[in-house]
Amino acid sequence: MSFSPTYDTTNPGAAVSNREQLLDVLTILAPEETPVLSSASKTKASATFVEWTVDSLSAPTTAGVAEGADVTTFTDKFSGRARLGNYVQKFRRDFMVSDLQGAVDSVGPAKIAQAEAKAVREIKRDIEATLCSSNDRSVEDGAGTVYGLRGLGKWIDTSPGSDVPSAYRTPSASIYASTAFTETVFNDLITSIYRVTGSTNSLTLVADTALRRKITDFARTSGSTDYTVRNVNTDMGNSTIKLSVEMYQSDHGLVSVVNMNPDCAPDTTNKDTGYLLNPDYYSVAELIPLGSTRLPNLGGGERGYVDTTLTLLCKHPGAHGKITQIA
């Protein structure tokens, strides 16, 4: 006995008149958080090369002064000043919707306003990835090299560049690039930062996924090779066991632990990068604020671009720390 099937849509029959079902739902699955960009204070840039000065105090002395001694020698109190700087970098994302696409109904929808909004979301991820990178600064030369900013991975380094005097570089004790990352190691990094700043300012650890999980394990194991389980007393009135760490209290200040955008992380293989940032000592300077420009429609449809030009100000590299390997 013959029947009318639903699967044959290429030959004459009932199936050719079946309606399609397209839900009015559009899903974009991509990490969009930008913790470094969002937490950085903003300032105004007025040149393509933004500079700032750093200074330090001389080492304390415990020597006394003889009674009646005259002052015969004098010290230049500003001899240790240095000038640091970073070039701006231009970011741009274009968008366009054809004239026909702008006229039809679609899920989402897919109009010029939505294309513009998507470009804004994309350019923020571009900025975040650049701030978190180990890129060194570069200057435009008109022959293919463009302005580029120095990222955190390069600033927070024992060899950031000859332009950074050794006295203002990140100490090696504030950088961890080895195996067997433990809670003791983590506290040593925090202590090293404290010995530079001398203050217990709250730090922010922007951590990729593997490092974030390692920090969480500090609350469950001893951190030693035998992985001794720790006993933790907690109020179980709500029947919830919390195993994540969002705030770590050390001997030298609080550390807020936040997730690094995995798409913007410098190491997408091991996923163990982390930056210990002191919010008081880094910011973003904008030469051209983020904005959108519409271009003339030449017949094909509406189009435009979003762009911004900015740079990273690492006000004192020694105020931060870095983790690049944990296992």
Image (tube, rainbow, N blue to C red):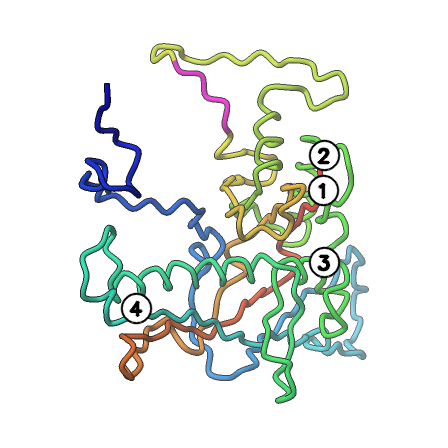
Q: Look at mark 3 in the image and give the residue it sits on.
A: 157
Q: Look at mark 4 in the image and give the residue it sits on.
A: 97
Does label 1 or label 4 sit earlier along the sequence?
4
Q: Nearer the viewer, mark 1 or mark 3?
A: 1
| Direction from residue 158 to residue 279 in the image, left or right | left
Which amino acid type corresponds to the residue marked 3 in the rendered image? Answer: Asp
Q: CA distance from mark 2 to mark 1?
A: 8 Å
Q: CA distance from mark 2 to mark 3?
A: 18 Å
Q: Quadrant of residue 318?
A: bottom right
Q: Look at mark 2 in the image and give the residue it sits on.
A: 181
Looking at the image, do the residues carrying marks 2 and 1 touch, with CB atoms under 8 Å apart? yes
19 and 83: which one is in front? 19
Q: CA distance from mark 4 to mark 2?
A: 49 Å
Residue 182, image x and y in percent?
70, 31
Label 1: element kind = strand
Does label 4 or label 2 sit earlier along the sequence?
4
Residue 206 tag number: none
